[in-house]
Structure formats: C-alpha cells, structure tokens
Amino acid sequence: MIDGRVYGESAAEMPARAYTIESLDTGLRLMQLFLTEDTLTVSEAARRLAIGRSTAHRVLSTLEGRGFAARDPSGRGYEAGPELLLLGRPAGFGAELRVRLGAVLDDAVRRTGETVQSAALIGGQVVLTDGRGSAHPVRVMPDTGRSLPAHATASGKILLARLTADQVCALYPQERLTAVTPRTLVSRAGLLAELAEVRELGRAFSRGECVPGLHAVAVTLVGASRRDRLALSAASPADRGDDAALAERAEQLRRSAALLSAGPP
C-alpha cells in the first residue's frame, strides 16, 4: 500500500468489507429491520444491531430526517417512513395478497365508475399503493407512489380514525395543521372531532382538502396486521362528488372491500 492505495490488486478483487462505510452499513441494517418489525424503539434497535444506544438514536434520527423512518403513533418508537415504503411494496404484502387487492380495485372501479386507489398510512402521510382509472373523459388520474398529508385526504382520515385520540395527538403534537388547500382542516381539535364522526360512520370524505375540485370517499381494507391495513378510496371531480354521491360510493366500496376480508376462494 502506497499513499493509502493498494497496488497489484484490482478494486474488484478486494474484499467487499474493505469498502464498507460503517455508519451507512448500520443505517441499511436498521432499514432492513423495518421489513419484519412494525415498530422499533432506540433500545431495541441498539440490541438487535449490537451497537450503542446513542449510535442507534443518531441513525434513527437521520433516517427520520430523510423520510425513511417515522415516529410511531405512540411516540415511543419508530416505524418505516414514506420514503422507505416508496422503495418497494409495503412490508407484509406477498404476491397472493397483491393479486387479491387487484381484484378489489377492479371490482371497485366497476361499481363506482370513478378512479379508485389503495393507500397505506405511514406516520402522518398516506402513500398511494395501487389504483385503477375511471373511464370518464374527465377523471382523476391514479397516482401510485405519491405521498400525501393524511389529514387532508379521505384515505388518511379513515386510517387515522383507526388510531386512538392519544395516538393521533402523538402524530400531530401541534394544534395547527398544515394547510394544503384553502379547504384543508387546519386544527387538531377539528381533526379529532371529524375522526370521531368517521369512526361512527365507517367512512371518510375529502372535499377539495388535498386537491382543489377533487372530492373523495374512503373506507378501510383490514389486513392481518397494521402494516397490511389499507384504505380504499374513490375520487372524482367535484361536480360528480356531492355528499349523496360520496355516501353511495362508500357503500359500493364496502362491498368491494369485503372481497379482501373474505380471503382467497
């Protein structure tokens, strides 16, 4: 070795470990844990990776800052963030379940006549995981992979309603919420009140709160675990999405969602 370089051995021939960046390796190993664990505390991450607690905390904080980890609803641990979800399919989704979900979406677009999408809740965001487009000339386009503020969407609200009030407050520690459009609900107290109504009715509306002129309704798709729990939504231009139309679509979405709950034939 001369001046820090190795001569007589190509880079391809050198052991891979010689090129390992320890901090990056730790971060990647931690991200792998989120593929099998719903949540991780700092202490659990340190124990599983055999690293110091302070190191685990720094790595988790770094991942959180880049969107690859998010605080879980309890505020005591971390879960996979939206950017990690966007790297591939949601954890826990095997090929069989994805086929069944596709059948649900096909049935839902047939029943409602509008664009339908599935979405997962990650922290305070929903990620659109799959969708089917409406046949109407003027329609909402499916936007698979997009991440949106949960409090501004029908899908986000139906999934937030599955949490307790304390868990919602952990996700939204400030009273003021981000305004996405002039119609977005911007107070935590108002969100909690609406979520209570969503729990009672079993469906959630969004009326121009995320995209001006777009109205949507969502119901839940209940999977085997929290990571498999999705929302099923139908979205349309506002002129085809008054409250009566949204309520009718909610019933149609429930019928489609029942195909997933029923399990494979």
Image (spheres, rainbow, N blue to C red):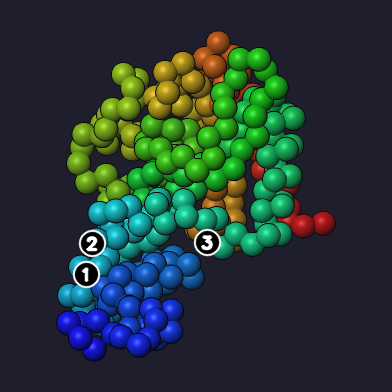
Task: Find residue 1 and report its horizontal and vertical position in percent.
Answer: 24, 89
Among all residues in the image, which is located at the extreme front?
8
> Against 189, is 70 above or below?
below
Secondary structure state at the residue bearing disc 3: loop
Secondary structure state at the residue bearing disc 2: helix
Task: Find residue 111 and report its horizontal and vertical position in percent.
Answer: 73, 29
Q: Quadrant of residue 117?
A: top right
Q: Which residue is mark 1?
A: 57
Q: From the viewer's side, name the closer residue of 3 and 211.
A: 3
* Amino acid on which disc 2 is placed: Ser
Q: Give the side of residue 121 with respect to residue 107, left or right.
A: left
* Amino acid on which disc 3 is placed: Ala
* Label 1, label 3: how far apart the Cα atoms are: 23 Å
Among all residues in the image, which is located at the extreme top?
239
Task: Find residue 131 and report its horizontal and vertical position in percent.
Answer: 61, 38
Task: Find residue 43 and report its horizontal and vertical position in percent.
Answer: 27, 77
Q: Are marks 2 and 1 in contact (CB under 8 Å)?
A: yes
Q: From the viewer's side, name the closer residue of 14 and 234.
A: 14
What residue sits 20% from the left and 41% below the top?
A: 174
Q: Which residue is mark 3?
A: 91
Q: Are marks 2 and 3 in contact (CB under 8 Å)?
A: no
Q: From the viewer's side, name the closer residue of 21 and 171.
A: 21
Q: Which residue is mark 2?
A: 61
Q: Is residue 28 visible?
A: yes
* Amino acid on which disc 1 is placed: His
Secondary structure state at the residue bearing disc 1: helix
